Image: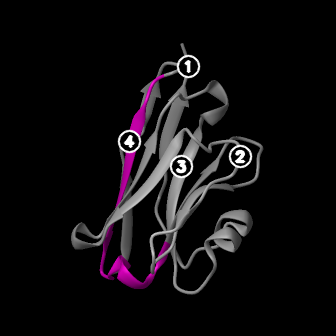
Amino acid sequence: QLQFVESGGGLVQPGGSLRLSCTASGFTLDYYAIGWFRQAPGKEREGVSCISSSDGSTYYPDSVKGRFTISRDNAKNTVYLQMNSLKPEDTAVYYCAAKRTSTIQAMCLLALGDYWGQGTQVTVSS
């Protein structure tokens, strides 16, 4: 059974940090581009970080650049999203996704994914 499980969400104060994890089972992440996406109530899903399968290149939109860092550990079949300097507008459900063939820019901009996790809530509030 193919599965993608996120963890690490929660409530954090503005300026705080969280680290999200996403572990795949039933398939190997080695050949997939991986992305983190978020969706706030009433808004469309948006890509916040994407990483390639080949050379580890990354893509971030301006809204999170310098604050979020995506990384992958293929040996653990896991992808991480380190989020620093969190803002209330970062509040959303965060999803990870894997895409077999795509540029990371297209993956993030168009919210593309072959496999999706169930999502984890991140709330930034004082």
Q: CA distance from mark 4 to mark 1?
A: 17 Å
Q: Amino acid at mark 1?
A: Ser
The spot of residue 27 in percent (x, y) is 33, 82
Q: CA distance from mark 1 to mark 3?
A: 16 Å
The spot of residue 24 in percent (x, y) is 33, 70
Q: Earlier in the sequence, mark 1 or mark 3?
A: 3
Residue at position x 50%, y 73% from top? 52
Which mark is nearer the camera, 1 or 2? Answer: 2
Residue at position x 71%, y 46% from top? 62
**Residue at numbered disc 2:** 62
Which mark is nearer the camera, 3 or 4? Answer: 4
Residue 19's label in the rendered image is 4
**Residue at numbered disc 1:** 125
Q: CA distance from mark 3 to mark 4?
A: 11 Å
- Secondary structure of residue under mark 2: loop
Which mark is nearer the camera, 4 or 2? Answer: 2
Q: Which residues are magenta?
A: 16-33
**Residue at numbered disc 3:** 94
In this image, 111 relative to 10: left or right? right
- Residue 80 figure quarter: bottom left
Q: Earlier in the sequence, mark 3 or mark 4?
A: 4
Residue 118 higher or lower than 7, as above or below: below
Q: CA distance from mark 2 to mark 3?
A: 17 Å
For the residue pair 11 and 33, the one nearer the viewer reads as: 33
The spot of residue 98 in percent (x, y) is 49, 73
